[in-house]
Image: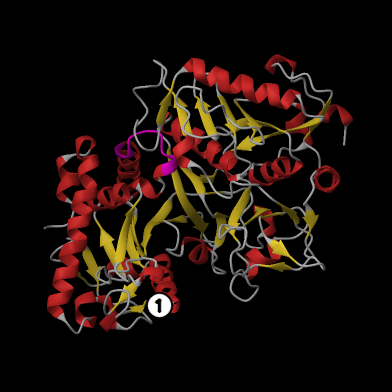
Amino acid sequence: MNSNLHRVDLAPYGLTVGAIHRNLSPAHLYEHAIRYEPGSSIADTGALVAYSGDKTGRSPRDKRVVKHPDSEKDVWWGPVNFPMDEQHFHVNRERAIDYLNTCERLYVIDAFAGWHPRHRLKIRIICSRPYHALFMHTMLIRPTEAELAAFGEPDYVIFNAGRFPANRLTAGMTSKTSIDLSFEEKQMVILGSEYAGEMKKGVFTIMNYLMPKQGLLSMHCSATADPKSPHSSVLFGLSGTGKTTLSADPKRLLIGDDEHVWGDDGIFNIEGGCYAKAIDLTPENEPDIFQALRFGSVLENVVFDDEGRVDFHDTSITQNTRGAYPIEFIKNAKIPCMAGHPTDIIFLTCDAFGVLPPVSKLTPEQAMYHFISGYTAKVAGTEMGVTEPSATFSACFGAPFMVWHPAKYAELLAEKLKEHQVNVWLVNTGWSGGSYGTGTRIKLKFTRAIIDAIHAGTLASAPTQADPIFGFDVVTAVPQVPAEILIPEQGWADKKAFAATAAKLAGLFVENFKKFESGATAEVKAAGPKT
């Protein structure tokens, strides 16, 4: 490759380090990681093993957005987007640059966010760790030689000085970690966290601000395409609902596993890679992911033996072990990662209360309500002997990364649903015949049969009956799924207990939605459950 492609001038940022490595190949980044980062190693599968230090997950309470007259009316301020003034952003940026200037060498990754050529962003990562450079080489869309030669000035720059702490005496700092974003200066600063996922989700946050300004819907979801037509399908779902498992469908093409945009001519992936959970990973359960964690991939915070064999069951460092790999490492990935408009939108929920049906069809207003709610349920920790399910709500199925009020994304979704006549489904992958502890988990083969029937178009004309509390149309016949589990109440031996549990969950929905009522229409508010 032309050596000029690896040259970049960082002096305009105040960076004066002599050794600057731009867009090194994975082989060279491996070499630098092994040579300069104690603890880095190579797994027997060929993946680079790296460690993120004290932080093994994101720090959402330490995320700050600069409050500026040009954008402050756009931002949904509160527990997701904490405000920061310009001066203290500059203080943190100066602190990051001062640290980076003490490093012997720096790494630059110039790459793209967004597969659509009209909507992609040029992203520049400046960091001190080869692990971070390889991670973003993997997660962003890698430029060709010609694209790199013509890259020019980036649209956004991320200064990753995560090895150096924020000053807790700086106004607005709550810890030694600070993740700061300025839409006006088009820069992001990372202090006090070496967790690579902060960069990935920082780029997603930027896209979540910019895409809606263009009338495009950014989405925290997985997406697949029909190999025999241009159409696609989108799956929303929080952790534990089956989003990754169900998108790994041998009958479909993978567009992406996490971040997408719905534009004027279809959907496109934001990323060039996948970032999968690695806990309890086996070649039997997740063959596609397991084989993708080879040379060119990153394994994060995993434990391995003297022979380089990774123990994916070992959570002594963290339960949030991860693997990042280029999307083309998945055999049925669709490259470029773009497809036509979806025919179906699927909201996945793992209802541990056991009262939501395995599959329901939603009206556009109900779709907006459930999109804004972003519901799933988790089982409380058994170490205290508590088995009562707890509801989890995350607006738009991705609240930590949303910039605008959730109603903004919901309105864009409603417009696109109406324009393209898309079916919307609520699919419960949780419990049936009772709540957690008395009922049973809906079998994966039944959920797969439901998804297959959705994609085949079978459910669009299937018989339904209205749910008296939640109001949606419950599908009552699905090929290869027992009819008795499709109507939740029929599976409960104690009908009074079912009614009480359904009323409880409905009340939790209503209580959660109160915080969004000011930005929702009367029709959307009326689409919620009746209490």
How far across and how far down the image is residue 394, in percent?
A: 36, 49
The part of the image, by quadrant, that contains residue 32 is top right
Which residue appears at 76% of the width and 68% of the height? 309
Mark 1: few, some, or many residues within 10 Å (few <14, many ≥20)? some
Image quadrant containing the C terminus: bottom left
Q: Is residue 264 visible?
A: no
Kindly indicate the quadrant of the structure image that contains residue 287: bottom right
The residue where tag 1 is placed is: 446
The stretch drawn in magenta includes residue 402: yes
Question: Which element type, helix, strand or loop, lies under badge 1?
Answer: helix
Image vertical order of residue 499 relative to residue 404, above or below: below
For residue 528, above or below residue 261: below
371 lies left or right of 221: left
Using the rendered image of the protein, determine whether residue 2 is visible from the camera's viewpoint.
yes
Q: Nearer the viewer, residue 74 or 246?
A: 74
Residue 57 covered by magenta stretch? no
Q: Give residue 469's quadrant in the image.
A: bottom left
Query: Which residues lie in the magenta part?
Result: 400-407
